[in-house]
Image (tube, grey):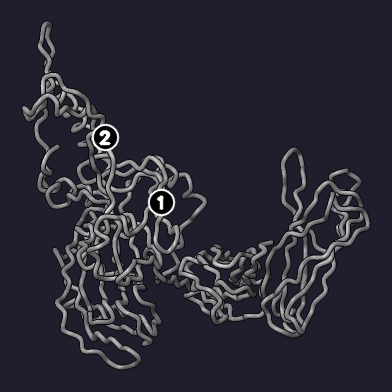
Amino acid sequence: MNNRKFYSYERNNYYYGKLLTSRDFQIEQSYMNDKRRLGNRLLCGSGIVAGMKVVEADDTAIVLQSGCAIDGAGREVVVPETVVVKLATIEGSRDLHTDVAYLSISYAETRADKVYAAMGNATNEQAEAGEYNHIKEGYTLRLHDADDCVPVKELKENYLVKTVLFEDEDYRITQEVAGYLPADCNLKVRVSAYKKRQTMDLLSVGYTLSVEGIKEQSFPIKMENLKMDRYETKVITESIIPKEEIRYLADFKLQIRDLEVLKDKQKCQVKELEPVTITTSDKNLLSFIVENSYKTAMDVDIEENYDNKIYLAKLYLIRSDERILLERIEEVPFKQYVYSASQIMLLEELKEFYPSTEKAERKIETVSSEVTYREQPGQTWKHKDFVTGTFDISLGNGGELGKTVYSDEIMHGLGEGPVYVEIAYEFLNKENGNMREEIIFGDSELFATGDAEEKQMQISCGVKVLPERGTFVVAVRSKNKVVRTGLRIRWYACKAEDTDKNISRLKEKQGMIIISPDTITTQPKGIVQIQPKFVNMEAEACSYEVLDQAGGKIDNNGIYTAPTAEGVYEIKVSSISSPEIFAHAYIIVSVEKK
C-alpha cells in the first residue's frame, strides 16, 4: 500500500537455485502486509477495534489504556500497555491557541537494533555506519487545535443533507435530514444546538418544515428555553411522515419556513434558507444502501475518505502562558469505531430482551457526552414526595442472637417534618437447587417453616424517624443465630400526609426515578458515578445538579467530583423530558472514607 492507492501486487516466484537478496525478502514482506491491510481497510473500515480509552490522570496528564485500532490505510495501530502521558509532552501541545483540542493516534515505524553490516548499507555508506536489524511498529500521539481539526467524514454523511439554520458568536444551530426516501421508510429531522461560549441566556428555536407544493403537509419543529453550558450540544429528533402521493415523485423539496431564533426572548436576525431536496426510491432501505455502496470506484473512495489519524478524545483545557491544565474529556468525538461480527451477533441475541418502543413519536437523544432528552407519551406523574433506596447493615459475627444493631442516620431527601418509612430486607432463598431473590416486609417469622435455610429469615426490623433532621435510623435484631454477617435493607419513604396517594401511584405503575445507593461516602476530590434507575418507565437521559453551593461538580453522565471541603452535599437527578420526575442522592465527603 503506497500513497493512498492500491496497486497490483507482486510476489516472489521461487525456483531451485534462485539467488535471494534483501530486495526479494522486502517484496515478500510488502506483499503479505499490503494484502492484509487491503482486507482491513475494505472489509473492516477504520477506527478503534478494542480499548484505547482515554481518562484523566490529573490536571496535567491523561491515561491511555491499551488497545488496537485500524487506520485509513488498513494498518494496525497497537498500544501494547496502558501508559500515563503528560499533556505538555504530546506533539502539537505548543501549537494550541484555543482551549479545545483533539487527541489523535497514528501508525508509526522506527528502526531498531543497529548492527554491523559487512556489505555496507542500502545508501552505499561505509560499512562502519552499520544497518538496522529490525523495524518496530508503534504509534504517535498528537494534539490538534479545534480550529484546525477537520471532522472525519462518516459514511452516513453521504446519505444526509446538513443545513446551518443559524450561527453567531454564541450558537451554531444545524438541521440534518436524510437526502433519500426509500420505499419502506419515513424521515426524521435532527436539529442540533451547539453553544460556543459561556453566556447566561436561554435559547429557543422554532420553524416549520413544509413539503413544497403541498400546503397541508407541514411539520412544526421546536426547541424551547434551552439553558446550555459552553461546548454543550442539545439535540432533538422529529418524525416526518410524508403523504403517499409524494413517494411517486422522483424527488420533492422540504422548505424551511418561519424560522425564529430567540435569545432571552429577543429575536435574532436569520437568513432565508434554500429548500432541501429529497430523492425518492422504490427500493427498500437495505437494497438502496447496498446498491449505492458499489457505485463509487475503489480508488476514488479511498482518496476521498483516507485519513491516517484516529481521534481518541476531545480535550477541554485551561490554558495559561506557563502550563496546560485538563478540565474534562469527551471520548471518541467522531465515533471512529470498527464493529466486529461478535458485536452484531450480540445485538441479535439481545433484541428479544430490548423490545423497541414504537409509540414514541418525539425523541431527543444523547450526542457524545452532551446533555440530551427523550420524550415519551403517557408519562404524567407529577408527585414529588416519594423516594426509595437501599443500604447494607452489618450484623456483626453471624448475627448474634438477641443483639440489636443500628444503621447510621439515613437522609431520605423529603426535607424536615414527619415522613412514613417502610423497610424490607433482601434475601436469597434456595429452592429446587436454584437461588431465588425475596424481599421480606413485616414479621419474617411468619414465613419460617422449620427448614434451616428458612430459619435464617427470623429477623425483626424497626425504624426511628427524626423529623427535625430529615433522617431516619433502622434497627435490626436477629431472633436466631444466622450464618450471614450483613443484610441489604430496602426502604421506601413518603410524606406521611400523602401515604395513600403514593401507594396509589405505585399500584398504577406510574414512572419514577430512584438512585441506588442514594447515600454515598467518598473522600475529598473523590470521583463517584451517580446511577439512576427507572421504575415503570424506560431508561432515558437525565440532568444532574449539585444543589449545594461549592458542593463539587457533576457532568452530564452523572460523574460527580467531590470538593476539597468535608460535608454532606445533595444532588438532584431529573428526567429531562418530564422534570417533575426526579430523585435525590446525598454525597458524604469525609477524609475517613467509610
Q: Earlier in the sequence, mark 2 or mark 1?
A: 1
Left or right position of 121 against 365? left
Count the marks: how many? Answer: 2
Location of residue 3 in the rendering, given as x and y in whole percent from the top left corner = 10, 43
Residue that carries the numbered disc 2 in the rendered image? 136
Location of residue 510 in the rendering, given as x and y in whole percent from the top left corner = 60, 72
Q: Type of residue at label 2? A: Lys
Left or right position of 324 against 383? left
| Residue at horizontal 20 percent and vertical 27 percent from the top | 32
The reply to whether residue 366 is in sight is: no
Q: Type of residue at label 1? A: Val
Residue that carries the numbered disc 1 in the rendered image? 84
Location of residue 312 in the rendering, given as x and y in whole percent from the top left corner = 33, 54
Location of residue 548 in the rendering, given as x and y in whole percent from the top left corner = 57, 80
The correct choice, above or below, for 292 with respect to 121 in the image is: below
Which element is circle 1 on? Answer: strand
- Which quadrant of the figure contains the C terminus? bottom right
In this rendered view, identify the residue nearer to me: 313 or 80.
Answer: 80
